[in-house]
Image: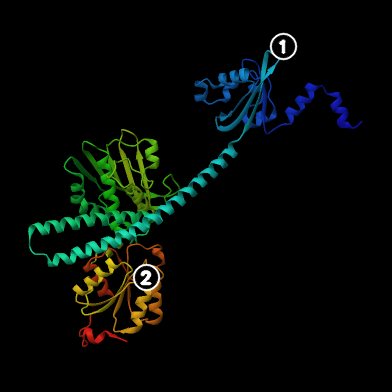
Amino acid sequence: MEQSERLAASLSEEGRYRLLVEAVVDYAIYMLDPAGIVTSWNPGAERVKGYAASEIIGQHFSRFYTEEDRAAGLPAKALETARTEGKFESENWRVRKDGSRFWAYVVIDPIRAPDGGIVGFAKVTRDLTERRDAQLVLERTREALVQSQKMDALGQLTGGIAHDFNNLLMAVLGSLELMRKRLPDDPKLLALHENAVKGAERGRALTNRMLAFARRKEAVAEAVSVPALVRGMTELIQRSLGPAYDIELRFPLVDRPVLSDANQLEMALLNLVVNARDAMYDGGRIVIALREEAVTGPDDRRLQPGSYLCLSVSDTGIGMDEETLRRAVEPFFTTKGIGKGTGLGLSMVHGIAERSGGRFMLRSRAGEGTVAELWLPAADRAALDEEARPAPQPSAPAGLVVLAVDDDPLVLTNTVAMLEDMGHAALAAESGAEALDLLRRTSGIDVVVTDQAMPHMTGLQLAAEIARHWPDLPVLLATGYMPDPDGVPLDLPVLEKPFTEADLAARLGALVPPRSERLISFAGRVRRG
C-alpha cells in the first residue's frame, strides 16, 4: 500500500478534515459556537485577519466587523440568517487586527446535530480587496471612456451648431452695422436698432460659450492682471447682479498676472458671478477673491508643480447637495428653470481652466453656499509689462481688390457689402473651386478672404492651393468654428466670426501694407480672361 493511502487510512474523518483546513492559507476558515464565539482558527484566518489562534479563540466573531456594522447589529443578523435560511452569504468591509479594512466575501453555514439542532457555525472568509479595487478601476476607466465619448459627441454637435449660429450672427450684426450708417437721426429708429444689436450680441455671447465648451474657439494665452480685469468688469458685473447684491473684492497687494485668454477669463468670471447670484434668491454678498499658492507636489487638485493664482467666487446661497455637486460641470445640466440657463456655463469654465493648464473646483454643501475656484498658472510680471505696451495698429489700405469666399450666401453678401463700404472692390465666390477659377481668370486680386467650413474644399485646403499656384497672394481665414485650431499654419491669419468692419479693416491692414499710390483704377486692374 502506498504511503499516502496508509496515511489516509490511519486518519479519522475528523483528522482528514482538520488536515485539509490547516493546509488552506488563502481562506479564513474557522468554527463558531451557537453564540458566535470562535472555537477554531486555521492558518488562513491568521494570514487574512492578522490574529494568532491564541489571540482569538474564545472571542466573539463580531470583532471582525466595522463599528458601524456592529452598531447596526449585523453580526447577530448574519447568524440568524444562517440559522433560519440555512446559509448566510455577503460581501462587505471587515477589520484586521491592525485596524485596517479589507473587502471580504463571507459565507456562514450552520452545523447541525443528528437531531437537527444548531451546535455551531462554519465560517469562511476570503479577502477580495485586490479584485474589488481592480474592478473599481475598470469601472472608472469604462465610465471615463463613455463620458469622454459623450463629451466628444456633444462637442462636435455644439461646435456644428455654433458654426451655423456664427453665420447667422455674421449676417445680422454686419447688416446692422452698415444700416446704422444710413439710418436717419430718428430716436425711435436708433433705439430699435440698438435693441437689435444687443439681441445679436447676446447671441454672440451664447455662441462663444458653445465654442468654448466644444474647445473650438481659438484661445490666446497671454499675461493677464486679474485685479485689473475684475475692476474693469465691476460695472458690468454690478449691472448683471442688480441692486440687491453686493460685491466684495479681496485681492492681494502683489499683482502677479496669470497666463490665460483674457476674453475667456472674463466670460468665466461673469458666469461664476451670475451663478452665485442665482443661488441667492433674496440678495446677498458675493466675494471675489484672489490668492497665490505654490504647488510643490501631487495633491487632490491634480495641479502640476508650479505657482498658481486662485480666483474664487463665494456666495451664501442655497448650496448644492452631493448629487448636484457631482453633476454641476456636466454640459447642459442646470438646476435653473426653463429658459433661465443653458447648462453650459460651468462646463465652459472647466474647459477654460483645463486649456490654461489649471483646474476648476467647486466646494458646496446644501444650505451653506458655494465656493467656485479657478486655478490658473502664474505668469511673469515682465510678460504683463510687455503685453501692456500698445501694439502699433496697421493703417487700413485703400482701393484693394478682394476675393471673398463663403458657401453661405448671407455671409458672402454681408462681407462683400463691408468691403465695398470700406472702399474696396469685391469679387464673390461660393466655393473653393469657384474661387480658384476666378483666380485663374482674373488678375490684380490683392487678397483672398475665405471661410473655413465649406463643403468639398475647406478654407485651409483653398489656402494651400493658392500658396501652391500664387505664393505671393495673402489669404485671410474667416471662421467661427475650427475643428482643429492647432492645424492652422502659423503664418495664416485668422479672423474670428462674427467680425465687424473695423476687425476686417485691421486684418487687411496687417496683410496688405498701404500703397502710397495706386495708379491703376479698379476697373483697369480687374481684367477677366
Q: Identify whether 489 is placed above or below 39.
A: below
Q: Which amino acid does label 1 sit on?
A: Asp
Q: Residue 457 at x, y = what percent?
A: 40, 71
Asked whether the viewer can see residue 197, the reply is yes
Residue 459 circle label: 2
Q: Residue 366 at x, y = what percent?
A: 33, 34
Q: Identify whether 492 is placed above or below 299.
A: below
Q: Identify whether 113 is placed above or below 509.
A: above
Tell me which corner region of the image, top left, top right, bottom left or bottom right, holds residue 32. top right
Residue 55 in the figure: left or right of residue 66: right
* Image quarter hosting the N terminus: top right
* Helix, strand or loop status at disc 2: helix
Q: What residue type is labelled 2?
A: Gly
Tell which residue pokes out farthest to the top in this image: 115
* Helix, strand or loop status at disc 1: loop
Q: Confirm or deny contact between disc 2 and disc 1 (CB under 8 A).
A: no
Which sits in the foreground, 118 or 525? 525
Tell me which corner region of the image, top left, top right, bottom left or bottom right, holds residue 185. bottom left
Tell which residue pokes out farthest to the right in this image: 1
Which sits in the foreground, 377 or 359? 359
Which sits in the foreground, 227 or 487? 487
Q: Residue 323 at x, y = what percent?
A: 40, 37
Which sits in the foreground, 180 or 93? 180
Q: How crowded is mark 2: few (under 14 residues within 10 Å), some or many (20 or more)?
A: many
Q: Which of marks 2 and 1 is nearer the N terminus?
A: 1
Q: Which of marks 2 and 1 is in front?
A: 2
Q: Residue 404 at x, y = what percent?
A: 29, 73
Q: How crowded is mark 1: few (under 14 residues within 10 Å), some or many (20 or more)?
A: few
* Image quarter hosting the C terminus: bottom left
Residue 260 in the figure: left or right of residue 100: left
Question: CA gap, disc 2 to disc 1?
Answer: 90 Å
Residue 115 circle label: 1
